[in-house]
Image: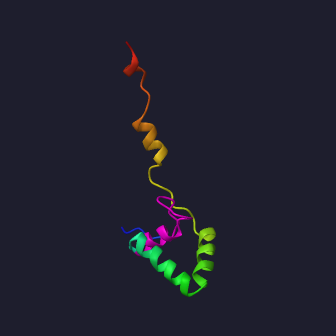
Amino acid sequence: METKKKLQRVNEDKVFTGVCNGLAEYLNMEVQTVRILYVVASLVWALPILIYIILSFALPVKELEIAKAEIIEDEYAYNEDDYKL
């Protein structure tokens, strides 16, 4: 069963709001390619800037499957038995 792709903002490795990361993930492209295309389009037209602002408010944030805080907490968990003499 295929899962439907959703256009979402991705907060991981974001520069501003994660819109380009979300577009890259949705389009199966490299993030740098999407960012370069966005900058070039913004230099030629003003519309991409307006679209970016609208998408930054309209798109939901993608939820990570495993929160980074949980990974760090598990990795550095304090165990009393390790420190008993």
Comparing 36 with 29, the one in front is 36
Q: Is residue 54 left or right of residue 27?
A: right
Quarter in which the C terminus is drawn = top left
Q: Residue at x 47, y 49 (%)?
A: 67
Q: Is residue 50 above or below residue 75?
A: below
The location of residue 15, given as percent across then percent down, is 52, 63
**Residue 46 found in image quarter:** bottom right
Q: Is residue 24 above or below residue 75?
A: below
Comparing 59 with 45, the one in front is 45
Q: Is residue 2 left or right of residue 50?
A: left
Q: Residue at x 62, y 73 (%)?
A: 53
Q: Residue at x 42, y 34 (%)?
A: 76
Comparing 64 with 5, the one in front is 64
Q: Is residue 40 left or right of residue 50?
A: left
In this view, the residue farthest toward the bottom is 44
In this view, the residue farthest toward the front is 43
The location of residue 36, given as percent across then percent down, is 45, 76
Count of residue discs = 0
Quarter in which the N terminus is drawn = bottom left
Residue 9 falls within the magenta-colored stretch: yes
The location of residue 33, given as percent across then percent down, is 41, 75
Q: Is residue 54 left or right of residue 38?
A: right
Magenta residues, start to end: 7-27
Residue 13 falls within the magenta-colored stretch: yes
